Structure formats: structure tokens, C-alpha cells
Amino acid sequence: MQIILFGAPGVGKGTQAKILSKKYKIQHISTGDILRDSIKKETEFGLMAKQLMDKGDLVPDNLIGDLVKEFLKSIDYKKGFILDGFPRTLEQCNLLDNIFAELQIENPHFIILESDTDLIVHRLTARRQCTNCNTIISLNHVKDISTCPSCCAIDTFVKREDDDEDVVRKRLEIYRKTTYPVIDYYRDKYNFIFLNAAEPVDKVTQNIIERLN
């Protein structure tokens, strides 16, 4: 099963992708994770990307496209995958079309998660990341963040610069202007599933599975 998971930053794409990845035993490809890994390793690409992301800007399309294609080639993509965070612009649609044509990927499912802007801002500004293992938690759900639940590191949770409210709202504005047209671009090409992401996580997962079935 090949899935493209779509929606604004903070709508819950990563959470649902991880759940679906385990259920269907397919690879979760997060462009955000790929970017953050490059930033952590301070590669040339990572340093350039960090400057853009800290300002709430998007990373150049061709660079993201190259990352996605190389990652797909490195896994058993014919078995299935979940692509999370790409495409976000019409230019990325063209890049993805070329990638799909080259790899002979023909009928992916597009899942669109939708939510209220203020709810997304509330979610993202409450996120904290462990600097030791990159685990992300929410202050809306976990009050004691003195110890990381994943790696047990002490006092390692920090607020990422791209989770500041001003940056979040700018990212959402960019999403509305540049990413909505992507939905129209693909609407008549592939199977589209629109879902309310404001519901509880398990309910959203249940709705996705029902629609896929």
C-alpha cells in the first residue's frame, strides 16, 4: 500500500504515519525527519535548511525531491510506503510525478488531514524535543518532562525554534498559499480521502483504516 499523507504542519501526519506504518508493515518516509537528521549532522544541506526553517520558510523543492527519490530507492518501495510532508507545492508535484514515473508507482492513496488553525497552533507551540534522541512530546499531554520516556536522559527537552508561535503561524500561512493548490492538482488523478484531524488520535486512525478498506 502506497500512501501520501497530506495536511498542515501540526495536523497529526507524523502520529498517524507511525501508526499506519506499524499496522501495514510499510516504511514511513518523513521529509521532516530527513531534514532534521541532516541538520543534526550539520551537513551542508542541513545548515542551509536550518536557516530557512528557523525563519518559517520552506526548503527548496529540488533538494527535497532529491532526498525523497534517494530514500525511496533505498527501501522496498514496491511493498509500500507512507510519504509524509511531500509534496507541498506545485513544483514538488512535478518532481513527484517524475519520481513516480521513474519508479513505476501508479496508484497511491492521498489522505488529507484537516484541522482548525488555532488548534494546530496550540498543538505545535506545546511541543518539546529531546536533544538526545529526538523524541517529541506535548506539554498538553505530559506535564513532567524532566526525564525522556524514550532514552531516560535528564533535562534534555527543549522547544524548537520552528515551534514558536510566530514561526508556526507563518508556516501555516505558507501552507495555505502554496499547498492548497496541490490538492486540486491531484484531485482527479488519485484516490483522495479527506478526514477531520481534530478528533482523538485513535478515532482518526480508525477512520483512515475504514476508508482505505
Image: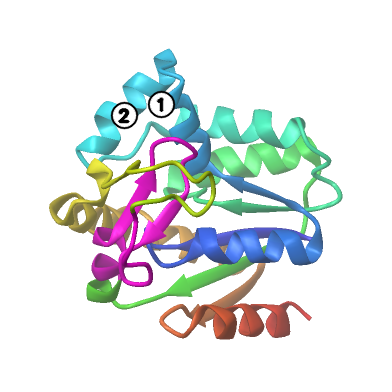
- Indicate the position of residue 195 as horizontal and vertical percent values: 52, 81
Residue drawn 42% across and 48% down? 89
From the viewer's perspective, tell me whether residue 203 is left or right of residue 181: right
Residue occupied by mark 2: 50
From the viewer's perspective, tell me whether residue 143 is left or right of residue 89: left
Residue 189 seen: no
Which mark, by number, is residue 58? none
Please say if 129 is above or below 180. Answer: above
- Indicate the position of residue 169 as horizontal and vertical percent values: 19, 58
Q: Is residue 207 magenta?
A: no
Query: Which residues are the magenta region?
Result: 120-145
- Indicate the position of residue 120 as horizontal and vertical percent values: 30, 69
Quadrant containing the C terminus in the rendered view: bottom right
Q: Are marks 1 and 2 in contact (CB under 8 Å)?
A: yes
Q: Amino acid at mark 1?
A: Ile
Which mark, by number, is residue 39? 1
From the viewer's perspective, tell me whether residue 45 is left or right of residue 66: left
Q: Amino acid at mark 2?
A: Lys
Residue at the extreme left: 166
Image quadrant assignment for residue 2: bottom right
Q: Secondary structure under badge 1?
A: helix
Residue 164 seen: yes
Of 79 and 93, which appears nearest the observer? Answer: 79
Colour option used = rainbow
Residue drawn 52% across and 78% down? 201
Residue drawn 85% across and 47% down? 78
Quadrant containing the N terminus in the rendered view: bottom right
Residue drawn 57% across and 61% down? 5
